[in-house]
Image (cartoon, rainbow, N blue to C red):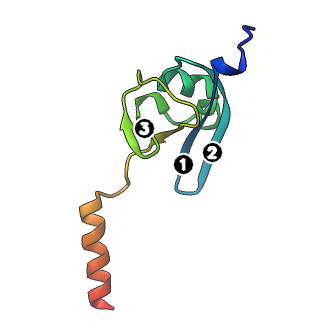
């Protein structure tokens, strides 16, 4: 295992959630680590074996990012699952329920 000095390591977390379950893995990565590499290093894929996490959109702190984006200390890397319902459609359905109310 390669040893890194404190200045060479960044604390990051990787988060993924399903409607009924969320996992957040916090760990250290070497400076220069990309979003995709951090996700791979986190081992989060093993917690969701039926999901293809690599094919999903990713971001840092709610902002969509490319997998090659370099992470910074304290970053929360998020893996975004597809929405079950289009946001516009969901608002329409809520409005309908309110109007019938």
Give the quarter of the image for residue 97. Answer: bottom left
Kindly report the distance in space between the C-alpha atoms of the residues bearing marks 1 and 2.
Answer: 6 Å
> Where does residue 79 sit, x and y in percent of width and height?
47, 39
Q: Is residue 82 left or right of residue 6?
A: left
- Residue sitting nearer the eye, 86 or 79: 79
Name the residue at 54% across, 48% down. 17
Earlier in the chain: of badge 1 and badge 3, it is: 1
Q: Which mark is residue 63?
A: none
Residue toward you, 32 or 88? 32
Which type of secondary structure does the marked residue at label 3 adopt?
strand
> Disc 3 to disc 2, how far (Cα)?
16 Å
Tag of residue 17: 1
Question: Could you tell which of marks 1 and 2 lies nearer the N-terminus?
Answer: 1
At 28% from the left and 57% from the top, the residue drawn is 86
Point out the tag, 3 or 2, that comes first from the N-terminus: 2
Residue 42 picture location, percent across and down: 63, 28
Give yes or no for contact between labels 1 and 2 (Cβ–Cβ under 8 Å).
Answer: yes
Q: Quadrant of residue 10?
A: top right
Q: How far across and down, in percent of the image, does residue 38 sit?
A: 56, 25
Say left or right for 87 vs 9: left
In screen coordinates, is 93 left or right of 17?
left
Q: Which residue is mark 3?
A: 59
Numbered disc 1: secondary structure: strand
- Nearer the observer: mark 1 or 3; the answer is 3
């Amino acid at each position: 295992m390669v040893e890194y000095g404190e200045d060479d390591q960044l604390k990051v977390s990787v988060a993924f959630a399903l409607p009924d379950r969320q996992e957040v893995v916090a760990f250290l990565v070497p400076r220069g680590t990309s979003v995709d590499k951090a996700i791979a290093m986190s081992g989060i894929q093993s917690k969701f074996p039926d999901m293809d996490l690599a094919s999903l959109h990713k971001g840092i702190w709610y902002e969509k990012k490319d997998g090659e984006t370099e992470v910074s200390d304290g970053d929360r890397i998020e893996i975004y699952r597809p929405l079950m319902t289009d946001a516009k459609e969901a608002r329409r359905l809520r409005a309908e329920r309110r109007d019938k109310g």
